[in-house]
Amino acid sequence: MKKLAFVINVFRESCFHSGGEKLFYELVSRSIQYGHMVDLYCSTYLGDKNILKNRLNKLTLLGSPKDFKYPRKIEAFYEKIKTITQKENYDFVISENISPPLDIGIIQGHSFLHYRDNAGNPFSKLLYSLVKSGHIKAQKQWLSHPYQKIAVPSEILKNELIRNFGICGEKFLVIHPGVDAPEEILSEKKTNNPFVFGISAPSFGKKGGYIFLKALSILKNKGYDFKSRLIYPKFRKNPRLQFLVKYYGLAEKVEFLSYQQDMTEFYSSVDCIVMPSVIETFGMVALESMIRRKPVIIGSFCGASEIITDAENGFVFDMSKQSHKNLAEKMEIFLHGNADYEKISEKAYRTALDYSWENFYKKFKENLIE
């Protein structure tokens, strides 16, 4: 039995706001399940049923969630944690995302340097550098003395951190996230006529929403019959997007959806999930779709592309140039009937089964805490 400390800003037991929150929950829950003594340090513990609270060895609440917007307050939070954990004689202290290093880091998001480099034109990059100068400086300082080991969800994130901070590659362990299998496995047969593409794009630009619209425009101009469903709650507050939908003539082809607390209906209503993300260290939507036998079309910037073999268990398209045209070509394969939908769907499902949370935790345990 190991004595473990987990450190996170906001810890949730359910209703996860991101794949990262779900991943950290699985780490804590399964560490307890495997018999380890687990202490949790966070600013906030959210859970209506307190599923884990009574199973923890100790819960320590420090600081405020809003403090994590400011580098100095993050450093103060971690200094408190460091003082406490040094007295506890933990085998491992596991913290989440880029922060002052304690021991093992579970980094799931890109650095501010990466966001700056992908901010767009030179003026946008300069503006981003000015606005985020404090955060950029802090992350450079934190990662100059990196963690004992760093777990990341993709080679894409690993390579970014090596490139921007010069961290030795041997420090990293790449563990692709897991997925929960639904109680009822849906049929792999296509259920919609016309074919329906789906995309979850709460951050419309970063998730490749505009690339998706341009690809739809190409398909429409070629005369294909299709529909699309887009999760983007702020559609009515985005005049540029409303203009583009009219300009491309997509009003009858596109349906915008509000925030989906439960994604089950969304997955069942589409035939294929599209992920043209400009910035995406993995993309849990891919696995959630595949475990429901829904194939995916994923851009090369998305970490989930690493589990896809093109034209076998899904499709991968090049994001480096003319991304919308490359995406449209992959979408056209389904519309033209050149793909064996049932066969690809089944292989997508079989792939997702290999990425269970149990397999994720076993790799974490064997490579990091044993």
Image (spheres, helix red, strand yellow):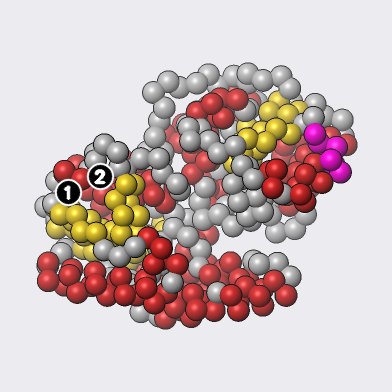
Q: Which residue was labeled with disc 2?
A: 29
Q: Is residue 264 left or right of residue 172?
A: right
Q: Residue 76 carries which label?
A: none
The residue under label 1 is which amino acid type? Leu
Q: Is residue 159 visible?
A: no
Q: Distance between the residues labelled 1 and 2?
A: 9 Å
Looking at the rendering, in which quadrant would you find the C terminus? bottom left
Q: Which of 157 and 117 is in front in this view?
A: 117
Stretch of the chain drawn in magenta: 246-251
**Mark earlier in primary sequence (1, 2):** 2
Q: Quadrant of residue 253?
A: top right
Q: Nearer the viewer, residue 175 or 261?
A: 261
* Residue at x 66%, y 75% (from the top left corner): 127
Q: In which quarter of the image is residue 94?
A: bottom left
* Residue at x 68%, y 28% (from the top left corner): 196
Q: Can residue 274 be seen in this view?
A: yes
Q: Position of residue 260 (x, y in %)?
A: 53, 35
Q: Nearer the viewer, residue 302 or 316?
A: 302
The residue under label 2 is which amino acid type? Ser
Residue 247 included in the magenta stretch of the image: yes
| CA neighbours of label 1 inside 10 A, class few (<14), some (14 to 19), many (20+) | some
